[in-house]
Amino acid sequence: MEATEQEPLDVESIRADFPILDREVGDGAPLVYLDNAATTQTPEQVIDVFSEYYRGYNANVHRGIHQLSQEASIAYEEAHDRLAEFIGADGREEVVFTKNTTESINLVAYAWGLNELGEGDAVVLSEMEHHSSFVTWQQIAERTGAEVRYIRVDDDGYLDMDHAAELIDEDAAMVSVVHASNVLGTVTPMRELADLAHDNDALILGDGAQSVPNRPVDVTDLDVDFYVFSGHKMAGPTGIGCLYGKQEVLEDMEPFLYGGDMIRRVTFEETTWNDLPWKYEAGTPLIAQGIGLAAAADYLDDVGMDAIQAHEERLTEYAYERLDEFDDVEIYGPPADDRGAVVAFNVDGIHAHDLASILNDHGVAIRAGDHCTQPLHQKLDIAASVRASFYFYNTMAEVDALVDSLDAARDIFG
Amino acid sequence: MSMGSDMYRQQILDHYRNPRNNGELGDATFSHEGYNPSCGDELEFDVKLEGDGETIERVAFRGDGCAISQASASMLSQKLPGMTLAEVKELDRDDVLDMLGVEVTPMRIKCAVLSEKVVQDGAKIYEGEADVDQTSTEDDD
Ligand SMILES: Cc1ncc(COP(=O)(O)O)c(C=O)c1O
């Protein structure tokens, strides 16, 4: 990572925007929320926009002549503009609202994959894909006769790019790779992968679920064809995600869901499709959630994505180094100074779920399990791991709370 | 402190560290395995029936997983000999929690009941009432 000359974040005033961070759990332990890779907390500013919508202008979009519908439609459409700007897309035509990352990947898999893939085609994934991509492409490949290939992850958690160059050959039709691993924290060379894909006339899908929330992302620079992420991991509401697609690719693709709103003209004989992005948003969409997501993008930009990344790098590096001091702790993935804001690890002799239960008594919320990456865990030869994941509202003191509470588990299991 | 740590009473830790009846039976009447996807816990039970074809004579199990799942298997392995398959099939979640003797937090119930489900499914398969390859705590009762 480049050395970041960022002003430190004023975390204290940021935390004031997140009332939930003040709560206690169990017998009055202050909450230490370190499960941000699963879901992030939501600032007042986003909650306000959400409730303003329901209090002030709740109506269906694209359908009414009346004023409420107009107001809702404009806010909902502009939310697409806002997200396009946030990720460096050309405009709302390239931003489809979905339910989450998983649905975004499924949309591409069904609308593009089922129609375009066949025997002799290959879909190239990495060994560290989240099940949302892993399972989806595996199933689509099975249905279409396509082959799935997995780019090796080396012992340090990096993608083996020589292997990638081998696998992404003229048979490759789709390359679908995670941009920042939700377990190892590895940040993959998305642009390099995109070039490899395009040199072989393949499309590329980047899973940005763990990168859009945490670092500046520009899909145009990355030159990806598709890019997917979830609102609930970026200070936004649940129930909303995005599919970015290059305009020409989305234009060529078949729709995913059929129904109202996604059509231009329907006759007894045939139907023509609506303009982008509405062609991919059948039925009444996620109106409040979409507007709320745009508010989350505003909030993140106010804090500053560079500052967010810098703060998270400091937290992650500190957590890694403190955990690494213990002989009984094994950390997975790349070194402290080259990873996204997650640290997955195990403490020798204590199962991840037992550890998580005990940490919970100390207010520390972390994830334990396989983090929807069973194949990666099989490769690491572990059944489960615990994962601490940070967001810009976390503090060094919270990292200390995590590390210190491991002793309570050692006392019980020691 | 509170709930979570309370699960790890001495008895649970003792069974986790020194599981009883851990291993295999060379003369098992039936064997069955199960998996708890939420924790990654695995258990396989061997059961040897007495001559009446109904009463459990001996059991052994092998497993890998969290303290709750493994301690539960160890404790169940002590409780089973002498029970009939019909009685085993009657066991429910509360029996398992009573046996454990600790307050199990809601997110960990699946770990606690895996052993019971494995043995019950094993019994049902043996008696031709069920047909599952592997028990999963996700297929809820
Ligand atoms: C890398 C990655 N991809 C995909 C997902 C799936 O996101 P969602 O559950 O919001 O669809 C997640 C998070 O769970 C993730 O971390």
Image (spheres, coloured by chain):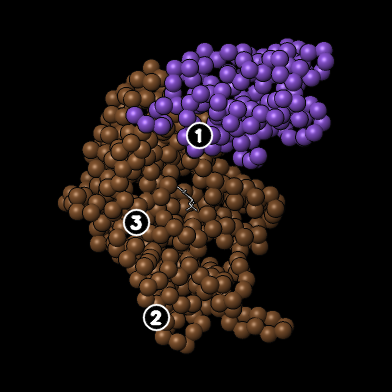
**Residue that appears at 47% across and 60% down:** A239
Is residue A21 rendered to the left or right of residue A197?
left
Q: Residue B133: which numbered mark, if any?
A: none
**CB-based contact (under 8 Å), mark 1 and mark 3:** no
**Residue that appears at 59% across and 76% down:** A260
Q: Residue A71: which numbered mark, if any?
A: 2
Dot 2: few (<14), some (14–19), or many (≥20) neighbours within 10 Å? some
Chain B: its colour in the image is: purple
Residue situated furthest left in the rendering? A7
User: x, y (%) of residue A395?
Assistant: 24, 43
User: x, y (%) of residue A24?
Assistant: 31, 43
Of the image marks 2 and 3, the number of the one nearer the N terminus: 3
Chain A: its colour in the image is: brown
Mark 3: which amino acid? Thr
**Mark 1, residue position:** B108
**CB-based contact (under 8 Å), mark 2 and mark 3:** no
- Ligand 1 near label 1 (Cβ, under 8 Å)? no
- A84 or A39, which lies in front? A39
In space, the residues marked 2 and 3 are separated at their CA atoms by: 24 Å
Helix, strand or loop at disc 1?
A: helix
**Mark 3, residue position:** A42
In space, the residues marked 1 and 3 are separated at their CA atoms by: 27 Å
**Residue that appears at 38% across and 17% down:** A414
Q: Is residue B44 above or below residue A170?
A: above
**CB-based contact (under 8 Å), mark 2 and mark 1:** no
Quarter-of-image position of residue A355: top left
